[in-house]
Image (cartoon, helix red, strand yellow):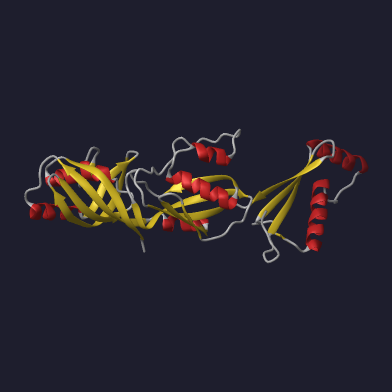
Amino acid sequence: MFGSEKCIPTVDIGTKIPFLFYENEDYLRSMFQIKGTIGIKTQINLLIREKLRKNKKCFIDHINPELKFDVVINNELDFSVNCKAKEFYLLGRYVKFARNIPQRDKSWMKNDSQTFFELIDKNEKSIEHSIRKSVMSEYHPEEMKITWTGSEDKHSLVLGSGRPFFVKVINPKVKGTDGKKVSDDGVDLQFRKIKQDQIDYYGKYRVMVTVLVGLDEKVNNIDHFQYLIKSLVGEVTFKVKNRKTKRNIYFAKLVNTRDDKLEISLDMDNGIPIKQLIGGNEPIKPCLSNILNTKCECIYFDINDVILNK
């Protein structure tokens, strides 16, 4: 568990006793007309905390402890001690060098009859698979919750500084190290601890994207297409769960052409649905298919870098 000779943990101690104890205590107080004395639960807590203070290997903190201990007493006066560590948040970034790696593992299911590492062996390769394996290995948590800040196609690469995500680490058994870097078969991960109120800042960013676009017709006038593609710059409106959403494109350029395919470069806010922006299969404005007046399809896109908003 947490703590070392150089790092003294903060702890809190509580007691859980059967309701029968309270009933008997109230009965005796009433019988002997005893008032003003501390209860049995408070007295147990004070005795334990006093011993810990004398030990000087931890500090008592009732407000924000690293470790919370509960002494659980049953009717037969047997007891056990439950320990829960303070949850914390990790800011992660992933870089994906290989294609055909999905972000999420849809087959992931918690199964109490199997160990985590048995489940890891069964699940297919994914970004989530790598994250869970790395966090479990480093912190041994009871549970973890991953929050994504965006997604990309499984065929897409994610380069540069990597796409951010967050992990809530619940009841870790090991304190672990900060600033961890992990490489896992085509995926590089970085983790560092952050405060909960920093999540909104790191969840807002721009992406530099290269998109390979397939057309219904062959490109004839490259200069005209270059001019039209620049008109993507500006505000983009679309719907997410029937709610109107606005984002911005800051830069759009035609990089290359080959027969009926275009390669374009975009600098835009995270959250714009790229396939929708290109093909317009769902309502979005602007849309490349409408701008070029020909049916367009996003074959795949790569994220070249991620830039945090100021």
Q: Is residue 95 visible?
A: yes
Front residue of 278 and 138: 138
* Residue at figure coordinates x 15%, y 43% from the top left: 290
Q: Is residue 250 left or right of residue 48?
A: left
Q: Is residue 116 above or below residue 93?
A: above
Name the residue furthest front: 185
Q: Position of residue 249 (x, y in %)?
A: 25, 55
* Residue at figure coordinates x 44%, y 36% from the top left: 106
Q: Position of residue 235 (x, y in %)?
A: 24, 53
- Give the quadrant of the C terminus: bottom left
Q: Is residue 37 left or right of residue 161?
A: right
Q: Position of residue 285 (x, y in %)?
A: 21, 46
Q: How many marks?
A: 0
* Residue at figure coordinates x 23%, y 37% from the top left: 281
Q: Quadrant of residue 76?
A: top right
Name the residue furthest bottom: 6
Q: Position of residue 86 (x, y in %)?
A: 62, 53
Front residue of 199 and 258: 258
* Residue at figure coordinates x 61%, y 56% from the top left: 175
Q: Is residue 25 left or right of residue 288?
A: right
Name the residue furthest right: 32
